[in-house]
Image (cartoon, rainbow, N blue to C red):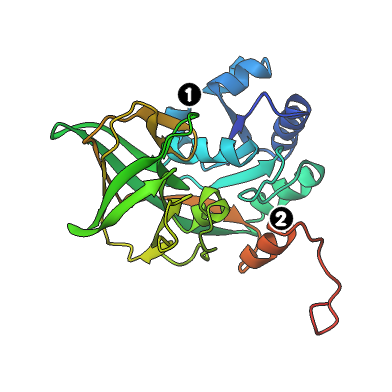
């Protein structure tokens, strides 16, 4: 019997109806649905509840119902475990999701027929050192940012790569992204789009106060070190734009490739540029006439 985990973002429109339909479909096809504990409470199905951290090894794969933010949080929680994730888009963009609520039955059928591939996405590991002591560590699928808060005060960070001084960056902050994260915050800050099957680190200055500061693509085994030079308190470390820690002057942040990866379920290979065209550029699938017009 296939055990399929379900994680639901209850704040999304129609989350209850879609999740209930998914549970019924899985049971009809002879699967054993397992609901993350809070999702089970939301659906009043405590009989199917299991904490997310206990999904492995009982769960074969996980359906995540929500937007990209929901999938990011689940990816971090499941990072140490080899559990593939299928995103079902209940959000706005759904760049990381592969399925939509209107084709839920078809999605279940494809999963059970094993008509899918699993993409292995590189993650980031970051460590925060304060007065020489490690105080926090995180894993991220998209990005790690060191940036100012709501007040309009410039921040300055000293950046090194593999111990070699790269420069001092003044502006709104700096961002280190994975290839998956290149289509998130980094993109709006002027960074390039990187295909997710390429393993690199992307360093992007955020609103730099100089014309010469540009994004830099780094090798996957490089280690980026950021030292906080600003002395005001309106500065923080963010992880995937969801977790945050207030920073202090002389804090050091190390960012490198994580030993973990995120396993994303996709229906077929080479869909990345279709997603870029349709979702980021806001274009519908075009009729093929040989010229792409």
- Give left or right: position of 48 versus 288: left
Instruction: Report crowding for label 1: few under 14, some 14 to 19, many 20 or more residues within 10 A (C-alpha).
Output: few
Q: Nearer the viewer, residue 163 or 256?
A: 163
Q: Which quadrant does the N terminus fall into?
A: top right
Q: Which quadrant does the C terminus fall into?
A: bottom right
Q: Residue at the spot x=83%, y=69% of the render?
A: 286
Q: Which mark is residue 4?
A: none
Pointers 1 and 2 in contact (C-beta within 8 Å): no
The furthest residue to the left: 132
Q: Nearer the viewer, residue 27 or 211?
A: 211
Task: Inspect this view and state whether residue 162 appears.
Answer: no
Instruction: Give the percent coordinates (x, y) of residue 23.
Output: 70, 31
- Identify whether 238 is placed above or below 200: above
Tell me the quarter of the picture where residue 25 sits.
top right
Instruction: Report crowding for label 2: few under 14, some 14 to 19, many 20 or more residues within 10 A (C-alpha).
Output: some
Q: CA distance from mark 1 to mark 2?
A: 33 Å
Q: Which mark is residue 279?
A: 2
- Give left or right: position of 249 versus 82: left
Q: Residue at the spot x=68%, y=42% of the render?
A: 88
- Identify whether 189 is placed above or below 292: above
Q: Which residue bears the numbered disc 1?
A: 51
Instruction: Give the percent coordinates (x, y) of residue 198.
Output: 45, 67
């Amino acid at each position: 019997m296939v055990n399929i985990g379900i994680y639901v973002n209850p704040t999304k429109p129609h989350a209850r109806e879609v999740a209930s339909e998914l549970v019924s479909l899985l049971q009809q096809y002879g699967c054993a649905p397992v609901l993350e504990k809070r999702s089970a409470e939301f659906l009043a199905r405590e009989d199917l509840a299991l904490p997310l951290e206990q999904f492995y090894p009982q769960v074969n794969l996980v359906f995540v119902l929500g937007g990209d933010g929901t999938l990011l949080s689940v990816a971090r929680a499941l990072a140490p475990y080899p559990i593939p994730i299928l995103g079902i888009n209940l959000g706005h963009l759904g760049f990381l999701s592969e399925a939509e609520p209107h084709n839920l039955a078809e999605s279940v059928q494809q999963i059970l027929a094993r008509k899918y591939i699993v993409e292995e996405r590189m993650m980031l590991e970051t460590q925060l050192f304060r007065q020489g002591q490690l105080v926090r560590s995180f894993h991220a699928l998209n990005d790690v940012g060191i940036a100012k808060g709501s007040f309009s005060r410039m921040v300055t960070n000293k950046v090194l790569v593999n111990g070699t001084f790269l420069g001092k960056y003044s502006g709104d902050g700096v961002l280190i992204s994975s290839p998956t994260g290149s289509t998130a915050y980094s993109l709006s800050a002027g960074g390039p789009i990187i295909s997710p099957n390429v393993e690199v680190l992307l360093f992007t200055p955020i609103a730099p106060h100089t014309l010469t500061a540009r994004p830099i693509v780094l090798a996957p085994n490089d280690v980026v070190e950021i030292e906080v030079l600003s002395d005001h308190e309106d500065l923080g470390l963010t992880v995937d734009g969801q977790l945050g820690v207030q920073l202090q002057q002389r804090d050091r942040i190390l960012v490198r490739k994580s030993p973990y990866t995120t396993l994303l379920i996709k229906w077929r290979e080479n869909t990345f540029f279709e997603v870029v065209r349709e979702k980021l550029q806001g274009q519908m699938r075009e009729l093929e006439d040989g010229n792409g017009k």
